Each structure stands twice: as C-alpha cells, then as structure tokens.
Image (cartoon, grey):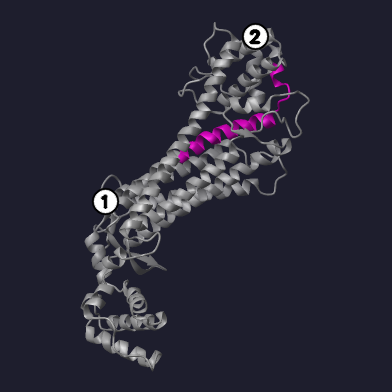
Amino acid sequence: MTNTIARDDFYWLGQINKASAVINARQGLLEGPAARRIAQGLQRVLQAAQEPGAERPTLVITFEPLLIRAAGVEATLLHAGRSSQDMLVAVRHAILRDEILGLAQQLHRTTQLLVGMARAHADAIVPNYTNGVAAQPNSYGHYLLGHACGLQRDAQRLQQVYARLNLSPMGTTVLNGTGWPLDREAMAAYLGFDGLVDNAYDAGQIHGAEMPVEIGHLVTTMALHVGAFIQDVTLQYSQARPWLLLREAAGNTYVSSAMPQKRNPGLLIDTRTKASRVLALASGRTWHAHNIPPGMNDAKVVVENVEVLRCAVDMLAMFGRVLDGLELNTARALEELNSDWTASQEVADVLMRDHGLPFRVGHHFASEMVSHAKQHDVRPSDFAYADAQAIYARTIAHEMPDGDPAFPLSAAGLRAALDPVGIVRSRQTHGGPQPAEMQRMLAAADADLAAQANWVQARRGAVEARSAQLDADFARLAGAALAPA
C-alpha cells in the first residue's frame, strides 16, 4: 500500500480480504495452494482497481464477483465465518478513523494558533463582557487561552471517541459469531484496530450505529466553541470605534453594495455559518439512529458520517483564518476600559481586603459611585476624590450607622484601584491573568499541544505499520512474482 491509494470502501474491503487470506492460510483454514491462487486473484483485482476509471465496488456483494472472475469460485472460501455485517462495520470504522485523525490534526493546528496568539497578547489589557455588557478588564492573552482550554477538552473527547471507535467487529459475522475458529485478534491487528468489540451482538447491531452519534456529539462542542468566539468578535462590529476587527484583506471583509462606509465581516459570517452547518449535520446523526431496530443501516451511511467530520475540519480551518486575521487595537481597548467602569469591583475588593469593610457595603458604595459618574458623564480617571468621600460617607451612614464615615482610600489609592492594567497584573487567583500564572498556563498549553501531536503521529504510525505488515505478509502468500498491491 502507498499513501496515493484511496483509502475508500474498496480499499478496506481489499485489506479485509488480504487479511482473511493470510490469517486463514496461517491457521490451516485455507489450504496452501488454494490460498496462493486466491491471493494472486485478489491481487489482480486490487491492481486493476488502481487504473483510471476502474471499478471500485463499495459492497461485499459487488466486490465478490470481481474476485470470482479473477480467481474462480473457490475464492469464496475467504468468506468462511464472515458477513457483510461485520465487514462493512469494519470498513466504515476504518474510514471514520482516518477522518477523525484528520480532524485531530486540524484541531491541533487551530489550537496551536490560538495559544500562540495568547502568548503574543499576554500583556494586552482589554474589556471582557458578561451578559453582553462590559464587565471587567482582562489580559487578551488570558481570554484567548480560556478559549484554547475548550479546544483542548475537544481534543480529549476526540481521543476518547477514537478509543471506542477503533475496535474491530471482524469475526462476529451477523450477531452471534461463527463455527469457524477465526483469529479475531490477528484480523484486528492487520486492520489497524487497537482491540475488539467484545460482544458479537454489539459488534454488528449496536456499536456501528452508536459511533456516528458519538461523533456528532464530539463535533457539536467544537462548533459551540467556535460559534461563541465568533459571536464575541462580531459584537465589536456594532461599535462605532471597535478595538478588535478583521484586517481588510484576503477575503476577510467586503464592502457593502449600497453603503460605502461598511466593511462587512464576511469571514466571521461564513465561519459562523459553517459552525451552524456542523451542528445541523451533527444533530442529524442522532435523528438517523433514533427509533430504529438494532443493526439497521440508517445511521451508518459512511458518506454522510464523513461529511460531518470534514465539515468540522473546514470549520476549524476557517476559525484559524479568523484568528490569523484579527487586528487588536490595544490603545483603543484601554481607552474603552478607562472610559467605562469595568474596574469598579476592584474598589469594593480593596475596601474589604485592605480595610475590612464588608463586601456588600463596598459594593453598594462602588455602585453609587458609578451611578453618580454616569449621571454626570464622568470617566473613572476624572472622578473627583471629594465626590468619592461624600458618597462613601452617605453609604456608611445608610449601611453601617456606627461605622467610620471617613473614606479609607487615599486619592492615589482610589486611582490605583481603578487602573485596569494594575488590576490584571495584581491578580492572585490560580489560573488568573497575572504574568506568572500566564507563563505557567502557556507552558501547560504547549505541553498539551505536544502531547496532541504525538498522539496523532502515534495512531497514524500504528495504522500504517500494521498495513505495511499486512501487505508484506500478503505478498509472501501470493508469491514473489507479483508486487504487493
């Protein structure tokens, strides 16, 4: 086998037949001369299928006539103890396995880009939002790293799905096995599976219909993560002076056909649309498997299940283009922070942490300060210290009549509490945006990315090595006169 051969249904049916010939001959279930004749006929079928326009049947019942023509009816001795049921489930799982590894590779690339951006913007201070309203200052790198955490969990889920998918149903026939003493473990190894679907009924009737549903669930969380990020960026486009936009190049944006001032975020829209398509296809996996008797084909159509995974790959690639096209205006972000009151919680925190004031009292004081500022159109940097003193005294009189009405913060202390940069850098929380924690989390993200890359490489390497071993063993069975297919 070479990487230029399409690893489609026909390819995997060929691999199953090759493995059956080698294993059954080794076990004595297929006599030596017959095994060689069948192997040589099978090899001719596989070689002919590589020609342009050649037949590449996708079903057992349409593959077998080609084999009979090439090797005679004795070629059907290969079918001892087999069924279309276990063979086609194995084919579909092998195809989905390749697609999942492709998805894992794209997920790694996109996550790596996100982590790289988080490192580059670790010191950039921007507003973060909750309930659609500016909430607190944060490091943009910390924000990006938070989104990367979601994709890292997607990678964990992908590996778990792979472990449940990459099990061989071969040797179980339809649902209760066979009287032939087949070597299921050897078949699983040759086909690159990591183990067996243990229960013969499960193998053909339950497992094959369940896995596409789980794949749908897997890509659902990816689409939700992508969609949330896209929506967050899209909100900037409703502002007159955004601090985050797409570069106007490479198809990222387009000019409105009627309004020349508009730069519509086409790439954002297209990526969100792709995420919605992933969700639609993913939910379809559940509906196709719903309310059917065990073993039915509704949920197993490989073309449809592959489409779900390929659409997810496209979505993640488009998300990567979005990330690569983002332009962050750090000065504008800081200006927005200093023109709003996203730092007001820190005032309540400082009053409690440094001066023992109950948080709710400090919260009420900060809220009254914000209300006064908005009523009089005052920015945090311009808020009069005397007004803060007066509001504090009124709050204490109302909340704590026996408390000291003197405002405990100095003018400089109040300014420091309202400084968004200082707030972010002085955080003490494990997992917070302060420089030391950012460095720790970035190192952990790098380690996780390396582990993801190693996982994909190891799984692909294992499948390729086992396929190469099968090809070598099959070539020996067929005879040195013919090259391996």
Q: Which residues are magenta?
A: 76-104
| Magenta span contains residue 97 | yes
In the image, 410: left or right of 101?
left
Which comes before the other along the chain, label 2 or label 1?
2
Mark 2 residue crowding within 10 angstroms, few (<14) / some (14–19) / many (20+):
some
The residue beneath circle 2 is 37
Inter-mark Cα distance, 2 to 1 = 64 Å
Question: In the image, which disc is placed on residue 247?
Answer: 1
Q: Where's residue 302, x and y in %?
A: 58, 36
Question: In the image, which disc is placed on residue 226?
Answer: none
Mark 1 residue crowding within 10 angstroms, few (<14) / some (14–19) / many (20+):
some
| Residue 125 falls in image quadrant | bottom left
| Numbered disc 2: secondary structure | helix
User: Is residue 81 visible in the rendered structure shown here?
Assistant: yes
Residue 185, placed above or below residue 76: below
Q: Residue at x 64, y 23 (%)?
A: 62
Q: How many labels, in total?
A: 2
Depth check, front residue: 97 or 364: 364
